[in-house]
């Protein structure tokens, strides 16, 4: 069932069917719009046309099944997607280029194709994460292709969804940001998001449950295009800073035998700080924070603005993985010839995404150090196999116990629920030595001690199974 009446339903073209484009396309259909999703990857489009979701994302398969060939269709034909559309959302990748700046070549290629397919006034929406003034560049590009100014507007509508909870985040957003430089284009974006901002969507009996409701619908903020572009980069940079901050505090906590979990709890109860994004660990990864912090840094540098704080955020993050690697080495004495079970490949739980995953970086380092790695992950093995080297030293196991069989130690790299609820006795029996080095703080040290493990985590005192009493710091 659709929330919008026929008159308020908007025909939307979404270009790019990745984590953002696909989720946006399916959710717009869920909100009652007619959506054509375009991708130049033929295999992906064929898969989507068959109703198969190429990514691991909660609720997406069911929602796609509900709307396929009704609210949403998929095609490789960009002109066919553009022609009927009032709004064209650009959701292609903006990876890190050389020099740290965002590589906007995919965006430019799409804008050129849109320009050639224009058949009347349309609003072009930047959904991809882009640096400030990209709206200006898109305008120039349209002009260069001979499209007059009164045939289009550019709006920045950054996306804040997280992988793993993308559908829920899209339909129950903390906020919707619309960066529009005139009323006409802002009005279209208001119409598109009306089911969420009026609460009409949440009144549906089959609406996805979440924090928004008819009484408390989603809020929409209208700003200039430049401000919206900066809101996206600044939000990601701020969250990355929060993670680096807690990781730096974790390192201090370790040095003085304090406990980072208690510290994060005590800090997070201050409403001005908040408890979220204070999980110490391996440092942030993924396809967004690393590249967006670098791109934001580059933007500041280009504008002559001193924003060295961002360099520190990155430095702390890089160092965090070095420290963890050193913990493994220190727990095992030497590494060459050892076997390690690696629990986790994805950059975080509930996704199959391994782009810029700390787990992958760590496994590469272990392999380089002569370690045999047996890795497992509930969703990301296929993705990891595509990027990790083929080697006799690297094997993939179906479950954590198989990975741990005969291993010198277990390292926990991704915070999957499956890894937080292990049968510790079974794990202990499978291992050659009961050593767990946990980059995600999934267990209470006392519980690990009771199960006979040497347990090293992040920002908390280490437990040494074979040592009587409190071990001297740094046994090596
Ligand atoms: P992705 O790599 O998963 O998907 C991009 C898609 O665009 C691919 O399917 C690719 O085939 C397609 N594509 C590339 N060029 C094309 C062209 N010329 N025509 C048609 N299709 C084309 O990327 P993503 O993770 O969805 O990220 C997209 C953008 O959204 C990035 O700017 C990213 O920073 C931003 N973003 C991502 C997330 C996230 O969680 N992944 C969240 C918020 C914002
Ligand atoms: C992040 C943002 O949270 C989204 O709002 C944003 O839309 C998205 O980037 C984007 O622009 O692409 P995502 O990358 O999916 O989303 O994942 P997060 O949950 O933010 O985690 C990012 C990384 O930080 C992961 O490696 C995670 O393990 C790590 N992290 C997160 C921590 O180490 N500690 C924390 O407390 C939180």
Image (spheres, rainbow, N blue to C red):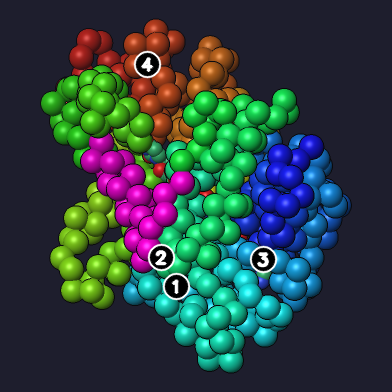
Dot 1 corresponds to which residue?
Answer: 135
Residue found at x 68% / y 78%: 120
Percent position (x, y) of residue 283?
35, 44
**Answer yes or no: do the residues labelled 2 and 1 have beta carbons within 8 Å?**
yes
Percent position (x, y) of residue 116?
67, 85
Tell me the quadrant of ligand 2: top left
C-alpha separation, residue under disc 3 versus residue under disc 4: 54 Å
Q: How many marks?
A: 4
Judge whether 430 appears above or below 414 on screen: above
Q: Does residue 65 appear to the left or right of 168 in the view shown?
A: right
- As drawn, which residue projects farthest toward the top? 450
Residue 130 in view here: no
Residue 444: mark in rendering: 4
Judge whether 393 appears above or below 144 on screen: above
Magenta-colored stretch includes residue 29? no
User: What is the secondary structure assignment of the residue under circle 1?
Assistant: helix
Mark 3 burial class by Cα count in 10 Å: few <14, some 14-19, many 20+: some
Dot 3 corresponds to which residue?
Answer: 86
Q: Earlier in the sequence, mark 4 or mark 2?
A: 2
Dot 2 corresponds to which residue?
Answer: 225
C-alpha separation, residue under disc 4 versus residue under disc 2: 47 Å
Residue found at x 34% / y 11%: 446
**Answer yes or no: do the residues labelled 3 and 2 have beta carbons within 8 Å?**
no
Q: Nearer the viewer, mark 4 or mark 2?
A: 2
Q: Earlier in the sequence, mark 1 or mark 3?
A: 3
Q: Earlier in the sequence, mark 2 or mark 1?
A: 1
Mark 1 burial class by Cα count in 10 Å: few <14, some 14-19, many 20+: many
Q: Nearer the viewer, mark 3 or mark 2?
A: 3
């Amino acid at each position: 069932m659709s929330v919008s009446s026929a008159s308020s339903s908007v025909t939307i073209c979404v270009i790019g069917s990745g984590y953002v484009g696909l989720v946006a396309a399916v959710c717009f259909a869920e909100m009652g719009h007619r959506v054509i999703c375009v991708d130049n990857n033929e295999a992906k489009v064929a898969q989507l046309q068959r109703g198969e979701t190429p990514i691991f994302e909660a609720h997406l398969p069911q929602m796609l099944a509900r709307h396929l060939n009704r609210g949403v269709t998929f095609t490789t034909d960009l002109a066919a997607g553009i022609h009927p559309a009032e709004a064209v959302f650009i959701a292609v990748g903006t990876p890190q280029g050389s020099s740290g700046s965002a590589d906007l070549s995919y965006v430019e290629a799409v804008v050129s194709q849109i320009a050639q397919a224009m058949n009347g006034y349309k609003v072009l929406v930047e959904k991809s994460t882009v640096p400030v003034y990209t709206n200006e560049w898109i305008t120039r590009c349209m002009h260069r292709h001979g499209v007059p100014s009164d045939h289009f507007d550019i709006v920045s509508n950054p996306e804040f969804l997280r992988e793993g909870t993308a559908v829920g985040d899209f339909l129950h957003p903390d906020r919707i940001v619309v960066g529009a430089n005139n009323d006409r284009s802002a009005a279209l974006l208001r119409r598109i998001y009306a089911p969420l901002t009026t609460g009409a969507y949440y009144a549906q009996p089959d609406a996805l449950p979440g924090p928004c409701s008819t009484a408390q619908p989603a809020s929409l903020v209208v700003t200039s295009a430049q401000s919206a572009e900066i809101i996206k980069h600044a939000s990601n940079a701020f969250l990355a800073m929060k993670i680096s901050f807690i990781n730096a505090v974790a390192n201090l906590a370790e040095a003085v035998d304090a406990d980072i979990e208690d510290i994060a709890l005590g800090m997070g109860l201050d409403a001005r700080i908040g408890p979220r994004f204070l999980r110490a660990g391996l440092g942030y990864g993924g396809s967004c924070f690393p590249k967006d912090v670098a791109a934001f840094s580059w933007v500041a540098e280009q504008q002559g603005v001193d924003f060295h704080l961002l360099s520190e955020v990155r430095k702390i993050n890089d160092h965090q993985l070095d420290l963890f690697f050193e913990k493994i080495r220190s727990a095992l004495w030497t590494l060459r010839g050892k076997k390690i079970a690696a629990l986790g490949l994805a950059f975080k739980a509930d996704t199959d995404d391994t782009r810029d995953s700390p787990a992958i970086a760590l496994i590469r380092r272990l392999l380089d150090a002569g370690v045999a790695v047996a890795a497992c992950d509930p969703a990301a093995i296929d993705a990891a196999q595509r990027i990790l080297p083929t080697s006799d030293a690297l094997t993939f196991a179906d479950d954590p116990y198989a990975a741990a069989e005969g291993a010198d130690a277990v390292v926990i790299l991704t915070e999957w629920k499956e890894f937080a609820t292990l049968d510790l006795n079974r794990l202990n029996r499978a291992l050659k030595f009961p050593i767990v080095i946990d980059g995600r703080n999934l267990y209470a040290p006392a519980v690990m001690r009771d199960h006979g493990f040497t347990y090293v985590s992040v920002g908390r005192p280490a437990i040494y199974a074979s040592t009587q009493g409190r071990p001297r710091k740094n046994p090596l």
